[in-house]
Amino acid sequence: MALIVHKYGGTSMGSSERIRNVAKRVAKWARAGHQMVVVPSAMSGETNRLLGLASELAPSRADKSYYRELDMLAATGEQASSALLAIALQAEGVPSVSYTGWQVPVRTDDSYTKARIESIDDQRVRADLDAGRVVIVTGFQGIDPNGNITTLGRGGSDTSAVAVAAAMKAAECLIYTDVDGVYTTDPRVVSAAQRLKTVSFEEMLEMASLGSKVLQIRSVEFAGKYKVPMRVLSSFTPWDIALDEEAKSGTLITFEEDEKMEKALVSGIAFNRSEAKISVRGVPDTPGIAYQILGPVAEANIDVDVILQNIGKDGKTDFSFTVNQGDFNRTVELLREEVVPKLGADEVIGNPNICKVSIVGIGMRSHVGVASTMFRALAEEGINIQMISTSEIKTSVVIDEKYLELAVRALHTAFGLDSAEVSKSA
Ligand code: ASP
Ligand code: MG
């Protein structure tokens, strides 16, 4: 029998009825002899509700003392859902105790609203497990070196669960959510999308960073660093399905490439609608341009994603890059005020109506021609590629936003992901 961590998202914890179902499911695992640690999110909508109240009172404050109170506030959502789950488990006849982040303690740095976990003390939790109790640890929160409550960023309970699993050396961390696994792409865009039985940790990391919102990206980084076996599965299956069946459902995130497995070239098509493109036109084609343009952008703490510098003509060139839509106006202003006059560039033009579509797969490492299959599929649909970026296991293109769905569908078909065969057998 093993030590298992379960994590339940806000939707799974959304009502007393659902919390009761979670309790019954956890009780099933505990009765099968497993030592259980459960990490719940706040009930769905609760974190938004709390933060909404704060912004009604102080819409635009941005100092540390305000962020401290936001964490103090937002952490209560998980405290409530954790206590409710412990109560529900006790009502099922399962001894259970809940702890907040500071009681464990889960130690973090002091970056309020986006704190990073530094260490987790496993003694208190282990003592309860050894005494036969199910232990509930609040997701999303911790305590900083000065004893202040911190939170880990939106969606942070995933990271709490993986961090607890790593600290406890759990056999597996099961992330129960409102989807039944990781798909080849968003099933709302491509109805033929397939659930993946396994996905490698590196692919998952790319997919999370490319905008697939199944897991908080930090949780995947954490799982990779500490090699925590992690599975994404549905909390909406009947709680009393056979444990063996449940334990194999969903998508397993793996760390080793299975030799026996016929690797799909591309495992998934990810996309991101929330980027915007900025071009600086007529920049003198001299050394240091990239630095002179992107230096001030980095200093303003703006993340840059895809970058493209055109071939110069008559001593001038164009330089384009993408940023998050939320940073778009700020970046354009900054370039117009600081960079254009200094560089003697012609103008800055922005285009928020773009999106990024990416193919992801560790199979790309050992195969050539994957990118050209991508470009052909897009060409056949008459979709113009504005920018390209590649890494070992992904190729991304920036295209006009209006072609997003067409592009994702075409690529899904071109890489053979529509067929049921793709569900890689574990
Ligand atoms: N309750 C937090 C949020 O809504 C953390 C989480 O659900 O993972 O972001
Ligand atoms: Mg979530």
Image (cartoon, rainbow, N blue to C red):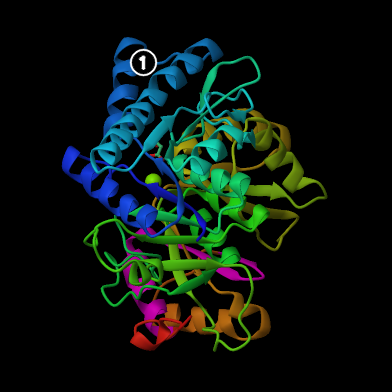
Q: Residue 419, located in which quarter of the rendered image?
A: bottom left
- Determine the residue positioned at 49% across, 75% down: 267
Q: Which one is nearer the viewer's eye here, 152 or 287? A: 152
Q: Is residue 407 magenta?
A: yes
Residue 407, percent across and down?
Answer: 38, 72
Look at the picture and state if 239 lies above or below 124.
below
Look at the picture and state if 269 lies above or below 169.
below
Q: Which one is nearer the viewer's eye here, 209 or 258? A: 258
Tell me if 266 is positioned left or right of 51 in this view. Answer: right
Label 1, on which residue?
59
Residue 418, percent across and down?
Answer: 34, 83
Q: Name the amino acid, label 1.
A: Pro
State the extent of the magenta-drawn residues as a range: 388-414
Q: Is residue 343 magenta?
A: no
Q: Is residue 116 visible?
A: no
Q: Is residue 110 visible?
A: yes
